[in-house]
Amino acid sequence: MTEKNKINNIIEKSSKAIAAYGLEKLVYSTLPPHKYISANVKSLETSIQKLKYDKILHEIFKEIPTRQGCRTSMGKQKLIEEIYGLNRYYKEKIEKADFSYMDKAIQQAKENQEPTSINKMMKIKKDEELAQKAEAKRLKKEAEEAELVKKLDEAKKANPDELFDAALIDLPLAPENFDLNSLKLPLADNALLLVVVEADDMMRGLEFIKHQNAVYKTNFIWDRDRIFVNGEWCKNRHTMFLLAVKGDPERPHNTFKAESVFFEHQSSATHYVPDYFYELIENMCLGKQYLEVFSNRQFSDSWHILDTKTNNLTNGEK
């Protein structure tokens, strides 16, 4: 076979391959393959021109049909590599790039007087998306905080004659020989109760919960770091908080999980429920009406104290 025949044979096979893989637009595009610039460029103007060439290729690649049964590692891919000197990974980078950010990449390159590239263009996109997410997160947090402030403010202004959504009952402070069965709390149909009991007096707390038509769910331990003299079977150093629900109150957010053991020292001459447990109820029942029973102090003006002698409610400053 003569040299001329060999050349004609190669041209014929190449033409058939180009037609078979739908590469006519790629081959005969205005992008000069022999002048295609390598990925590593140092000149600002050259890098900008290359990015523009990449965009042209991006548009061409989107329109190239894929022949059924064609393996991307052979045939069409090989032709593209030979025509433009592109390896598979850079071709995929061009295909996946978002060239709507090209103008910003070029503007940034000119401002910084530094070469640009697909990687820098995509970094601009990523930075903008991260900034948008951060801003959305900030706005969401501000909205949630504003809603919380509104709920807590509404709870402070709530009418004490209404029913309560949460209650803390300090049974160790109940008057001696007080008939708990005579006490019916003004609770909403769906409410949360936190009943304070000494370790040796848990049954009394459970009976009180049942009398309020509530159901025991779990408990918290307050480690008081002191020895109770009234422990019959052991030297009790803790107080228990029985958590119960009436009806079906709204559950805390799934990200909220309270610690089951809390430590705060109190001497034997002192007794008051630590702030932790009031805040626990407030976190579980945001912006609700809160009731204290047998309390020797008022935690805040969001809380109402029930006078068990008169069944009157008080609400005022701490």
Image (cartoon, rainbow, N blue to C red):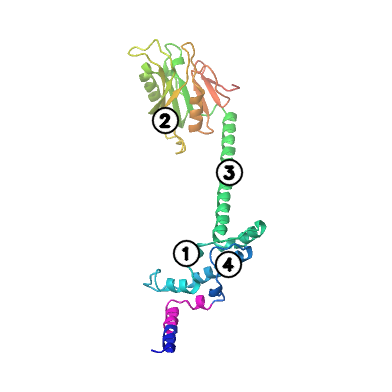
Residue 248 picture location, percent across and down: 42, 35
Q: CA distance from mark 1 to mark 3?
A: 35 Å
Earlier-in-chain disc, 2 versus 1: 1
Viewer-side label of 1, 3? 1
Per the image, label 2 sits on a secondary structure element best described as strand
Q: From the viewer's perspective, is residue 98 above or below residue 276?
A: below
Name the residue nearer the viewer: 9 or 174: 9
Q: Residue furthest right?
A: 111
* Residues at marks 4 and 1, CA–CA distance in whole angstroms: 16 Å
In-image side of 112 versus 223 (left or right): right
Residue 25 part of the magenta segment: yes
The residue shown at (49%, 13%) is: 270
Badge 4: few (under 14), some or many (20 or more) residues near its Cα, within 10 Å?
A: many
Highlighted range, magenta: 12-28
Q: Which residue is mark 3?
A: 138
Residue topped by disc 1: 92
Real-space Cα separation, disc 4 to disc 3, in angstroms = 38 Å
Q: Is residue 171 magenta?
A: no
Q: What secondary structure is found at the residue carrying circle 1?
A: helix
Q: Secondary structure at mark 4?
A: helix
Mark 4 or 3 closer to N-term? 4
At label 1, which amino acid type do we have?
Glu
Are circles 2 and 4 on residues that touch, CB within 8 Å? no
Residue at the (46%, 38%) spot, across then down: 255
Secondary structure of the residue carrying tag 3 is helix
Is 4 placed above or below 51 here? Answer: below
Task: Judge whether 214 appears above or below 54 on screen.
Answer: above
Q: Nearer the viewer, residue 254 or 116?
A: 116
Q: Amino acid at mark 4?
A: Lys
Mark nearest the camera among 2 and 4 is 4
